[in-house]
Structures are given as structure tokens and as C-alpha cells.
Image (cartoon, grey):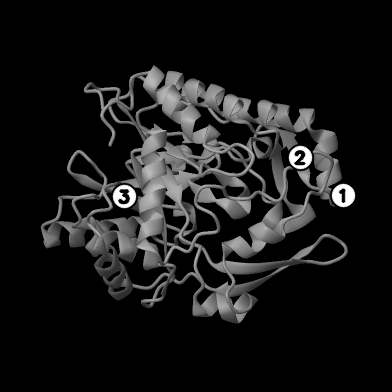
């Protein structure tokens, strides 16, 4: 990357849910993966782009190191700096979907930066009745144990922290917490994680990043001791009364008539970046190429309709302009491969490498991806 205080680094969230494992077999049927929802998706309104079919990589299996190598090659084409792999530590040494991380660590030739995000929430099966009410069945409960559990959690992530490819800010390993306000004592958790890190000799402390979808939570999270906050404005209509007024009829159809919430990407993407907030040194905003939750939730899902590489490029340019003067200029990208949420950068049959090429072009135009290999 170009030297200087405002070099931008794009860190893409990475979903490991693309291979079968026993718990999913039990809950959903043998062989279930995220692809199961993707394949069976149907168009729910005129012009609805479904199903979304992967192109270059096909319906891949993340038990293959070669698949990850191909993903990395594409991410480099996009100018992406690192993957933030979600890991699922439920407490009491219960971990799911850990194989992709293991493969990366077992194969040092996969030359790409990584960091970890703790997806600290229970897994639920959401079932809607005829009245549109959801009854959620807990499949795997997120538990928060005492010091013994925190120590076991640290030992689990330690194998990644000592890897040369792990992302650091300064000399501090980056660690993202998905639901910081849901943790009953996140301050004690961070304190113990830092103590264990220092005791291990890896680094003096973590660079903790709290994740949120609500601007109102930024300072709350910061005041807990997080070094920065990643804000993901995937649902700005929830918090901005002006937006709610503009889409009142769509919300009525969504909440009362039980139809998908369809928002044009050209409209909703205007609210992904807030310059006055995102210019803060302790706020890392998020790039959002697309969104369509209907493969998972059907007519109870939301859709950012007509998302295109061109419109995504305008969004990327706006994000770069809002954040270009930071010393630590990090943009998260949601997401690299959330196919079940229609939220991905990987090539599909309609756009090919369109989103990848656009992101690369925006970074290159601003001289931010020189030297990435």
C-alpha cells in the first residue's frame, strides 16, 4: 500500500458457514449448509433477482484449502486487505464452524491477512405463524462463563494471534465483538483477554472493536473501553425518522401485509455513510455492496433492490471521501460471502466480477491499493 497516514485498509467479513457439520445435520437435515437456502430462493416480486447463482467459485465447500486460496486470489483482485473471520465460541469449549480458520493456519502459503470476530449470540430457528409472529427456538445458546471460560476462549484464538498473518493496529491484534452490549460483563472479558495476551508475550493488549448497527450505541460502546467501533448501517430506516417517513408505505406492507421490505439500493445506500460520524478516528464505517435476506426469511425478509457495481462504486467513493484523513483508516466490508443474505462480493452469474473490479478501481483511483499482492 501507498505509505502515509491515510492509507485505507478494507477488511471484509467472512462467513465460514459453507460446509456440513453434525449439528446442522441434526437441526436441518443431512448435508445442510448455507447453500441450501441460497439454491432454493425464489423471486418474490417483479424484477426480484433470485436465485443468486455463484459463478467462478461455484457452490464451494470450505473444507477445501484450495477453495480458500481461490477466494483469497479474488479478494486480492478487489484490493481487500484482510478477512475478518467470524468465530462461534458458545462457552464451555463449544465451538462451531472452525474448520476454515484451521485450514488457513495449517497452510502458510495462503498469503493473506486475517483477524477474528466473535459472533457472540445464540443461534435460533425462526418460525413465523400465519399472523406473522415469529417463535424462535434456541438451537445453540450463547453462554458467558467465568474466568475459566475466558481463558479457554483465549487459548482457542491464540493459535491465530501468533500467526504472522494476523491483523494488528500498531502492535495490537485486532479483535471484533459482534454484540458488545449483549455481553453481561464485556469490560471484565476485555480486561482478562488483555491480561492473558500480555502474559503470553504476544502483545501488550488487544485493539478491541465493537460492532453495532446503531449510531446511538457508538459512544456507549466506546465508554466500555473499546478502542474503536465498527458501525454497519444496514437498516438506517430503523433509526432515522426522516427515512421512516419516506418509506412508510413500504414498512406498512412489510409489517402488516407480510410482504418483503423492498428498498432501492440507489436510495438506501445514501444512508450507509455519515461523514460527521465516520470521520471520527474511533469509528470504522462499513461498505455494503448488496443485501437480500429472503433466501433465509422469505417474505419476511428485506431487499436492497437493484444493487449494481456502479452504484456500489459511488458508495465506496463516498466512504473514502468521508474517512480519508484518518491515521488508522479502516473500512469494513459487509460481506465477502454472506450469500444467504444476498450480501457478497464473490462473482455471480449476473455481475461476474463487477463488484470486485469496482472496489479495486475505487481504491486504485485513490491510490490505496498499490502494492497489494
**Residue 128 in sight:** yes
Residues packed near mark 3 inside 10 Å, few (<14), some (14 to 19) or many (20 plus):
many
Q: Quadrant of residue 340?
A: bottom right
Label 2 to label 3: alpha-carbon separation? 34 Å
Residue 20 in the image, given as x and y percentages of width and height: 51, 72
Label 2: which secondary element = strand
Does residue 89 sit above or below 215 in this rendering? below
Check the picture and name the quadrant holding the C terminus.
top left
Does residue 353 sit above or below 205 in this rendering? above
| Disc nearer the start of the sequence (1/2) | 1
| Disc nearer the start of the sequence (2/3) | 3
Query: Which circle, 1 or 2, is nearer the viewer?
Result: 2
Residue 298 in the image, given as x and y percentages of width and height: 75, 56
The residue sitting at 59% across, 25% down in the picture is 310
Q: Is residue 32 left or right of residue 93?
A: right
Check the picture and name the quadrant holding the N terminus.
top left
Circle 1/circle 3 CB separation < 8 Å: no
Label 1 to label 3: alpha-carbon separation? 43 Å
Q: Quadrant of residue 103?
A: bottom left
Give residue 256's mark. 1
Q: Quadrant of residue 236?
A: top right
In the depicted view, which residue is nearer to us: 328 or 103?
A: 103
Label 3: which secondary element = strand
Label 2 sits on residue: 262
Residue positioned most to the left: 201
Label 1: which secondary element = loop
Give residue 114's mark. 3
Amino acid at each position: 500500500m501507498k505509505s502515509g497516514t491515510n492509507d485505507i485498509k478494507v477488511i471484509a467479513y467472512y462467513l465460514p458457514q459453507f460446509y456440513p457439520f453434525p449439528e446442522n445435520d441434526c437441526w436441518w437435515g443431512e448435508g445442510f449448509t448455507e447453500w441450501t437456502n441460497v439454491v432454493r430462493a425464489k423471486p418474490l416480486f417483479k424484477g426480484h433477482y433470485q436465485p443468486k447463482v455463484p459463478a467462478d467459485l461455484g457452490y464451494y465447500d470450505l473444507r477445501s484449502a484450495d477453495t480458500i486460496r481461490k477466494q483469497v486470489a479474488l479478494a486480492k483482485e478487489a484490493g481487500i486487505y484482510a478477512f475478518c473471520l467470524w468465530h462461534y465460541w458458545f462457552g464451555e469449549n463449544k465451538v462451531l464452524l472452525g474448520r476454515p480458520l484451521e485450514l488457513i493456519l495449517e497452510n502458510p502459503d495462503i498469503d493473506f491477512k486475517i483477524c477474528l470476530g466473535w459472533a457472540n449470540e445464540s443461534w435460533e430457528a425462526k418460525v413465523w405463524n400465519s399472523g406473522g409472529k415469529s417463535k424462535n427456538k434456541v438451537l445453540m445458546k450463547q453462554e458467558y462463563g467465568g474466568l475459566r471460560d475466558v481463558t479457554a476462549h483465549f487459548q482457542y484464538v491464540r493459535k491465530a494471534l501468533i500467526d504472522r498473518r494476523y491483523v494488528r493496529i500498531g502492535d495490537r491484534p485486532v479483535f471484533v465483538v459482534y454484540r458488545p452490549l449483549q455481553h453481561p460483563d464485556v469490560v471484565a472479558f476485555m480486561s482478562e483477554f488483555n491480561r492473558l495476551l500480555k502474559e503470553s508475550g504476544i502483545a501488550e493488549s488487544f485493539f478491541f472493536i465493537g460492532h453495532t448497527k446503531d449510531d446511538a450505541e457508538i459512544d456507549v460502546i466506546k465508554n466500555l473501553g473499546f478502542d474503536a467501533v465498527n458501525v454497519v448501517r444496514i437498516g438506517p430506516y430503523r433509526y432515522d425518522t426522516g427515512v421512516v417517513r419516506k418509506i412508510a408505505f413500504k414498512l406498512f406492507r412489510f409489517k402488516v401485509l407480510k410482504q418483503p421490505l423492498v428498498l432501492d439500493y440507489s436510495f438506501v445506500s445514501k444512508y450507509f455513510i455519515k461523514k460527521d460520524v465516520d470521520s471520527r478516528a474511533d469509528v470504522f464505517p462499513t461498505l455494503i455492496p448488496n443485501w437480500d435476506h429472503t433466501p433465509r426469511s422469505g417474505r419476511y425478509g428485506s431487499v436492497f433492490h437493484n444493487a449494481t457495481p456502479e452504484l456500489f462504486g459511488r458508495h465506496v467513493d463516498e466512504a473514502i471521501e468521508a474517512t480519508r484523513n484518518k491515521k488508522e483508516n479502516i473500512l469494513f466490508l459487509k460481506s465477502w460471502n454472506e450469500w444467504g443474505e444476498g450480501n457478497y462480493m464473490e462473482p455471480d452469474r449476473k455481475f461476474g466480477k463487477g463488484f470486485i473490479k469496482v472496489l479495486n478501481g475505487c481504491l486504485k483511483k485513490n491510490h490505496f491499493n498499490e502494492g497489494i499482492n
